[in-house]
Amino acid sequence: MKQQEQHAPTVEYAGFIVRWVAFTVDNALFALVTIVLLFPFPNFEDALPVGIYRTVITVLIVAATIAMWVRYDGATPGKKLMNIKVVDADTLQGIDVKTGMKRYVGYIMSSVMLLIGFVMVLFSEKHQAFHDKFANTLVVYT
């Protein structure tokens, strides 16, 4: 009886350009949502309610982003458009909420580091940005 060979799944890592396009699409959508939700505040004389409202909107957008990574096969609208998704680097399966939160914190750190965290995609064998390494995730083609 011959042993069946087990083949490792073929993984194609998403590169810098495709990821940047997805990121730009997502940011444009989130900006549009923010503008629509801030529409009730056309008068910016009293900054406190506007600031509180913006904070609530930001928290909701962050939560929605993490939920999309976890619930919708690792993909935000921009990632869906580009046929890419976020997966766990070890299992190549979808990520959980904890990993999604960690990845989002890594996003912030990638941004604070003068975007160098994003540029790391260009120099990583698996095209991982800082936030991917931080959360042990990969962005792969679907």
Image (cartoon, rainbow, N blue to C red):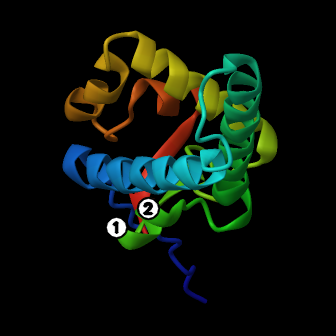
Q: Residue extending furthest bottom? A: 1
95 left or right of 97? left
| Residue that appears at 69% across and 20% down | 46
| Residue that appears at 38% across and 35% down | 128
Q: Considering the numbered disc 1 on the image, is that residue within a helix, a strand or a loop?
A: loop
What is the three-letter code of the residue carrying label 2? Lys
Q: Considering the numbered disc 2 on the image, is that residue within a helix, a strand or a loop?
A: helix
The answer to whether the residue labelled 1 contacts the one labelled 2, judged by CB atoms less than 8 Å apart, is yes
- Compared with 51, 3 (above or below) is below
Whole-percent x, y for residue 65 in the image: 63, 49
Q: Nearer the viewer, residue 4 or 103?
A: 103
Whole-percent x, y for residue 51 in the image: 69, 23
Whole-percent x, y for residue 41 in the image: 65, 40
Residue 101 seen: yes
Label disc, if present, on residue 79 of the rendered structure: 2
Label 1: how many Cα within 10 Å (few below 14, some 14–19, many 20+): some
Q: Residue extending furthest top? A: 113
Q: Which residue is mark 1?
A: 82
Distance CA(mark 1)–CA(mark 2): 5 Å
95 left or right of 134? right
Q: Quadrant of residue 68?
A: bottom right
Residue 8 seen: no
89 left or right of 82? right
| Residue that appears at 79% across and 36% down | 98
What is the three-letter code of the residue carrying label 1? Met
| Residue that appears at 46% across and 70% down | 80
Query: Quadrant where the N terminus lies?
Result: bottom right
Q: Nearer the viewer, residue 38 or 130?
A: 38
Label 2: how many Cα within 10 Å (few below 14, some 14–19, many 20+): many
- Compared with 2, 47 (above or below) is above
Q: Quadrant of residue 115?
A: top left
- Compared with 29, 43 (above or below) is above
